[in-house]
Amino acid sequence: MVKSLNLAMAEAMREDPDVLVLGQDVGKDEGVFRVTEGLLQEFGPNRCIDTPLAEAAIVGAGVGLALAGFLPICELQFEGFSFQAFHQVENHVRRLRNRTRGRYHCPLIIRMPYGGGIRAIEHHSDAPEATYAHLAGLKVVIPSGPRNARALLRAAIQDPDPVIFFEPKAIYRAIREEVPEQPETLPIGRGWLSGRAPT
């Protein structure tokens, strides 16, 4: 799944110069789980942006970038720390389209590893997906395997509205699956099983 997510971001960044990645350690250190491996080398520091350890600032900067016409992919290191940015998500990210009567969209993705299964404690093994799923104006995506992880992340990048993208860290490297060379997307809002081909 790590390789598939990386592939989806790299493909999108090659296809569209407005796609960029930002978050703590996404550049030089390639992310805490190495999902952004190689992106800094290929796309440079203006499109693979290392930020301070400040989740509210990461998401807040993403909102500004989205309003300026970019397609930001914000990475938060662990889901438990997403609540440090909750006011940005609740007050701005999810409300922009409705608040502006459709004049502005917020094409923003917030990616974060979530869930247990790696013997991490405290804030590193939460499962807050229901909290976000109950907020109007957000789409919540949880891939079940490598192929649909890539296809769903590509769909999220193309979506004009904000997407919370939870990545089950217990299966980051636990499942192997053939991923086609040809890029593919899956529609967001339907259930997909790993291994099922897109329609």
Image (cartoon, grey):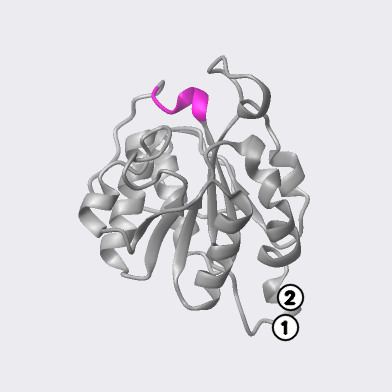
Which image quadrant for residue 98? Answer: bottom right
Which percent across, then down, holds residue 185? Answer: 41, 54
Task: Look at the picture and state if 34 lies above or below 104.
Answer: above
Q: CA distance from mark 2 to mark 1?
A: 5 Å
Q: How many marks?
A: 2
Q: Residue furthest front?
A: 52
Relative depth, front residue between 86 and 102 = 86
The local secondary structure at tag 1 comes to loop
Q: Are marks 2 and 1 in contact (CB under 8 Å)?
A: yes
Magenta: main secondary structure equals helix
Q: Position of residue 41 (x, y in %)?
A: 22, 51
- Highlighted magenta segment, given as a residue range: 169-173
Q: Is residue 15 left or right of residue 20?
A: left
Residue tagged 2: 98
Q: Is residue 87 visible?
A: yes
Amino acid type at mark 1? Arg
Does dot 2 land on a helix, a strand or a loop? helix
Q: Which mark is residue 101?
A: 1
Q: Amino acid at mark 2?
A: Asn
